[in-house]
Amino acid sequence: MPTITTRLTFWYVGIFGLIIAGVAVAMVATFDRQRRESIDVDLAAYADLLVSGMGGESANIEDVFDELTEAQKKPRAGFKAHRFVVASKDSVVFETNILADTDSLVALLQKRIPSDTASAFTTVVLNELEYRIFAKRVPRKRGSFQLIVITSLDRLYESLHELRSLLLMIVPLSILAAGLGGWFMARRALLP
Protein backbone atom coordinates (compact mmCIF):
# COMPACT_ATOMS: atom_id res chain seq x y z
CA MET A 1 0.00 0.00 0.00
CA PRO A 2 1.40 3.40 -0.98
CA THR A 3 2.31 5.82 1.74
CA ILE A 4 0.29 8.95 2.43
CA THR A 5 3.10 11.01 0.84
CA THR A 6 2.86 9.03 -2.38
CA ARG A 7 -0.95 9.27 -2.49
CA LEU A 8 -0.86 13.03 -1.89
CA THR A 9 1.76 13.41 -4.62
CA PHE A 10 -0.33 11.40 -7.10
CA TRP A 11 -3.40 13.53 -6.34
CA TYR A 12 -1.40 16.72 -6.72
CA VAL A 13 0.20 15.60 -9.99
CA GLY A 14 -3.15 14.39 -11.37
CA ILE A 15 -4.98 17.64 -10.63
CA PHE A 16 -2.07 19.78 -11.81
CA GLY A 17 -1.75 17.66 -14.97
CA LEU A 18 -5.43 18.11 -15.82
CA ILE A 19 -5.21 21.86 -15.28
CA ILE A 20 -2.05 22.31 -17.35
CA ALA A 21 -3.38 20.05 -20.14
CA GLY A 22 -6.60 22.08 -20.23
CA VAL A 23 -4.62 25.31 -20.45
CA ALA A 24 -2.49 23.87 -23.29
CA VAL A 25 -5.57 22.79 -25.27
CA ALA A 26 -7.16 26.22 -24.73
CA MET A 27 -3.94 27.91 -25.90
CA VAL A 28 -3.84 25.91 -29.14
CA ALA A 29 -7.55 26.52 -29.83
CA THR A 30 -7.23 30.26 -29.13
CA PHE A 31 -4.10 30.57 -31.29
CA ASP A 32 -5.84 28.73 -34.16
CA ARG A 33 -8.96 30.92 -33.94
CA GLN A 34 -6.98 34.17 -33.75
CA ARG A 35 -4.73 33.23 -36.68
CA ARG A 36 -7.74 32.30 -38.82
CA GLU A 37 -9.40 35.62 -38.00
CA SER A 38 -6.15 37.38 -38.87
CA ILE A 39 -5.99 35.57 -42.22
CA ASP A 40 -9.57 36.64 -42.98
CA VAL A 41 -8.77 40.26 -42.15
CA ASP A 42 -5.66 40.10 -44.37
CA LEU A 43 -7.59 38.60 -47.28
CA ALA A 44 -10.31 41.27 -47.07
CA ALA A 45 -7.69 44.02 -46.76
CA TYR A 46 -5.83 42.68 -49.79
CA ALA A 47 -9.03 42.58 -51.84
CA ASP A 48 -9.82 46.17 -50.82
CA LEU A 49 -6.26 47.21 -51.66
CA LEU A 50 -6.50 45.68 -55.12
CA VAL A 51 -9.86 47.30 -55.81
CA SER A 52 -8.65 50.69 -54.56
CA GLY A 53 -5.56 50.41 -56.78
CA MET A 54 -7.65 50.02 -59.91
CA GLY A 55 -7.92 52.96 -62.22
CA GLY A 56 -10.90 53.70 -64.42
CA GLU A 57 -14.01 51.83 -65.31
CA SER A 58 -12.66 49.01 -67.44
CA ALA A 59 -14.93 47.79 -70.19
CA ASN A 60 -13.97 44.12 -70.15
CA ILE A 61 -12.61 41.48 -67.81
CA GLU A 62 -9.18 41.43 -69.46
CA ASP A 63 -8.71 45.14 -68.68
CA VAL A 64 -9.87 44.55 -65.09
CA PHE A 65 -7.33 41.76 -64.79
CA ASP A 66 -4.56 44.02 -66.13
CA GLU A 67 -5.47 46.77 -63.65
CA LEU A 68 -5.47 44.29 -60.76
CA THR A 69 -2.12 42.87 -61.86
CA GLU A 70 -0.64 46.39 -61.85
CA ALA A 71 -2.15 47.08 -58.39
CA GLN A 72 -0.64 43.82 -57.14
CA LYS A 73 2.89 44.80 -58.27
CA LYS A 74 3.09 47.63 -55.76
CA PRO A 75 5.31 46.59 -52.81
CA ARG A 76 3.14 45.17 -50.04
CA ALA A 77 5.25 42.83 -47.90
CA GLY A 78 2.35 41.48 -45.85
CA PHE A 79 0.45 40.18 -48.87
CA LYS A 80 3.12 38.24 -50.76
CA ALA A 81 1.42 34.86 -50.17
CA HIS A 82 -1.96 35.99 -51.53
CA ARG A 83 -3.12 35.40 -55.10
CA PHE A 84 -6.26 36.49 -56.92
CA VAL A 85 -8.76 35.24 -59.48
CA VAL A 86 -11.14 37.45 -61.45
CA ALA A 87 -14.44 36.08 -62.75
CA SER A 88 -17.03 37.78 -64.91
CA LYS A 89 -20.70 36.87 -65.17
CA ASP A 90 -20.04 34.54 -68.08
CA SER A 91 -17.55 32.60 -65.90
CA VAL A 92 -14.47 33.65 -67.85
CA VAL A 93 -11.67 33.38 -65.31
CA PHE A 94 -8.17 34.80 -65.35
CA GLU A 95 -5.65 33.80 -62.75
CA THR A 96 -2.26 34.72 -61.47
CA ASN A 97 0.22 32.11 -60.31
CA ILE A 98 -2.06 30.25 -57.88
CA LEU A 99 -1.16 26.59 -58.24
CA ALA A 100 -0.64 23.95 -60.90
CA ASP A 101 -4.25 22.68 -60.93
CA THR A 102 -6.00 26.01 -61.49
CA ASP A 103 -8.90 24.50 -63.47
CA SER A 104 -9.92 22.29 -60.54
CA LEU A 105 -9.69 25.25 -58.19
CA VAL A 106 -11.85 27.42 -60.44
CA ALA A 107 -14.48 24.67 -60.74
CA LEU A 108 -14.49 24.24 -56.98
CA LEU A 109 -14.81 27.99 -56.42
CA GLN A 110 -17.74 28.26 -58.81
CA LYS A 111 -19.55 25.54 -56.84
CA ARG A 112 -18.74 26.97 -53.40
CA ILE A 113 -19.17 30.71 -54.02
CA PRO A 114 -22.16 31.78 -56.13
CA SER A 115 -21.36 34.58 -58.58
CA ASP A 116 -24.03 36.86 -57.09
CA THR A 117 -22.51 36.75 -53.57
CA ALA A 118 -21.61 40.22 -52.23
CA SER A 119 -18.70 38.88 -50.16
CA ALA A 120 -17.91 35.58 -48.48
CA PHE A 121 -15.14 33.58 -46.84
CA THR A 122 -14.72 29.87 -47.37
CA THR A 123 -12.09 27.18 -46.97
CA VAL A 124 -11.46 24.63 -49.71
CA VAL A 125 -9.29 21.54 -49.91
CA LEU A 126 -7.64 20.84 -53.24
CA ASN A 127 -5.03 18.13 -53.80
CA GLU A 128 -4.77 17.63 -50.02
CA LEU A 129 -3.88 21.31 -49.51
CA GLU A 130 -6.18 23.70 -47.70
CA TYR A 131 -6.83 27.22 -48.98
CA ARG A 132 -8.69 30.13 -47.39
CA ILE A 133 -10.68 32.18 -49.88
CA PHE A 134 -12.39 35.57 -49.82
CA ALA A 135 -14.75 36.45 -52.67
CA LYS A 136 -15.99 39.98 -53.22
CA ARG A 137 -18.43 41.29 -55.81
CA VAL A 138 -17.04 44.51 -57.29
CA PRO A 139 -19.65 46.65 -59.06
CA ARG A 140 -18.62 48.63 -62.12
CA LYS A 141 -20.53 51.05 -64.34
CA ARG A 142 -20.86 48.34 -66.96
CA GLY A 143 -21.64 45.23 -64.93
CA SER A 144 -19.58 43.76 -62.15
CA PHE A 145 -16.91 41.17 -61.53
CA GLN A 146 -16.04 38.82 -58.72
CA LEU A 147 -12.61 39.22 -57.14
CA ILE A 148 -11.46 36.08 -55.34
CA VAL A 149 -8.40 36.30 -53.10
CA ILE A 150 -6.69 33.04 -52.14
CA THR A 151 -4.04 32.06 -49.64
CA SER A 152 -2.70 28.71 -48.51
CA LEU A 153 -3.15 27.65 -44.89
CA ASP A 154 0.22 25.87 -44.81
CA ARG A 155 1.85 28.53 -42.61
CA LEU A 156 -1.04 28.31 -40.13
CA TYR A 157 -0.62 24.55 -39.83
CA GLU A 158 3.17 24.87 -39.50
CA SER A 159 2.70 27.35 -36.64
CA LEU A 160 0.15 25.09 -34.93
CA HIS A 161 2.52 22.13 -35.28
CA GLU A 162 5.37 24.12 -33.69
CA LEU A 163 3.12 25.25 -30.82
CA ARG A 164 1.91 21.69 -30.19
CA SER A 165 5.48 20.36 -30.25
CA LEU A 166 6.58 23.00 -27.78
CA LEU A 167 3.66 22.24 -25.47
CA LEU A 168 4.33 18.49 -25.72
CA MET A 169 7.79 19.17 -24.29
CA ILE A 170 6.79 21.77 -21.69
CA VAL A 171 3.68 20.11 -20.23
CA PRO A 172 5.28 16.76 -19.25
CA LEU A 173 8.37 18.52 -17.85
CA SER A 174 6.23 20.87 -15.77
CA ILE A 175 4.14 17.95 -14.48
CA LEU A 176 7.33 16.07 -13.57
CA ALA A 177 8.72 19.13 -11.79
CA ALA A 178 5.42 19.67 -9.97
CA GLY A 179 5.35 15.99 -8.97
CA LEU A 180 8.86 16.10 -7.53
CA GLY A 181 8.12 19.36 -5.74
CA GLY A 182 4.82 18.02 -4.41
CA TRP A 183 6.44 14.81 -3.18
CA PHE A 184 9.19 16.80 -1.43
CA MET A 185 6.69 19.18 0.23
CA ALA A 186 4.35 16.36 1.27
CA ARG A 187 7.24 14.39 2.73
CA ARG A 188 8.50 17.43 4.71
CA ALA A 189 5.01 18.33 5.91
CA LEU A 190 4.34 14.80 7.19
CA LEU A 191 7.61 14.39 9.11
CA PRO A 192 7.01 13.85 12.84
Image (tube, rainbow, N blue to C red):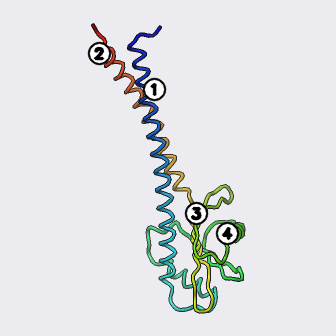
Residue at 67 percent of width and 66 percent of height: 100
The answer to whether the residue labelled 4 contacts the one labelled 1, judged by CB atoms less than 8 Å apart, is no
The answer to whether the residue labelled 4 contacts the one labelled 2, judged by CB atoms less than 8 Å apart, is no
Give SS at disc 4.
helix
Percent of width and height locating residue 36 = 51, 58
- Residue in the foreground of this view, choosing between 106 and 21: 21
Percent of width and height locating residue 58 = 58, 91
* In this rendering, position of residue 58 left or right of residue 166: right
Q: How far apart are marks 4 and 1 (CA)?
A: 48 Å
For the C terminus, give its image quadrant. top left
Between disc 1 and disc 3, whose residue precedes? 1
Between disc 4 and disc 1, whose residue precedes? 1
Discs 1/3, front: 1
Task: Kindly identify which residue carries mark 2.
Answer: 189
Percent of width and height locating residue 186 = 33, 17
Q: How far apart are marks 3 and 2 (CA)?
A: 56 Å
Task: Kindly identify which residue carries mark 4.
Answer: 109
Between disc 3 and disc 4, whose residue precedes? 4
Vertical relation: 157 (above or below) 95? above
Q: How far apart are marks 2 and 1 (CA)?
A: 20 Å
* In this rendering, position of residue 86 left or right of residue 172: right
Give SS at disc 2.
helix
Amino acid type of the residue that numbered disc 2 sits on in the rendered structure: Ala
Task: Kindly identify which residue carries mark 3.
Answer: 132
Between disc 4 and disc 2, whose residue precedes? 4
Q: How far apart are marks 1 and 3 (CA)?
A: 40 Å
Check disc 1: other Cα within 10 Å, few if <14, some if 14-19, many if 20+: some
Discs 4/2, front: 2
Quadrant of res 5: top left
Task: Kindly identify which residue carries mark 1.
Answer: 14
Amino acid type of the residue that numbered disc 3 sits on in the rendered structure: Arg
Give SS at disc 1.
helix
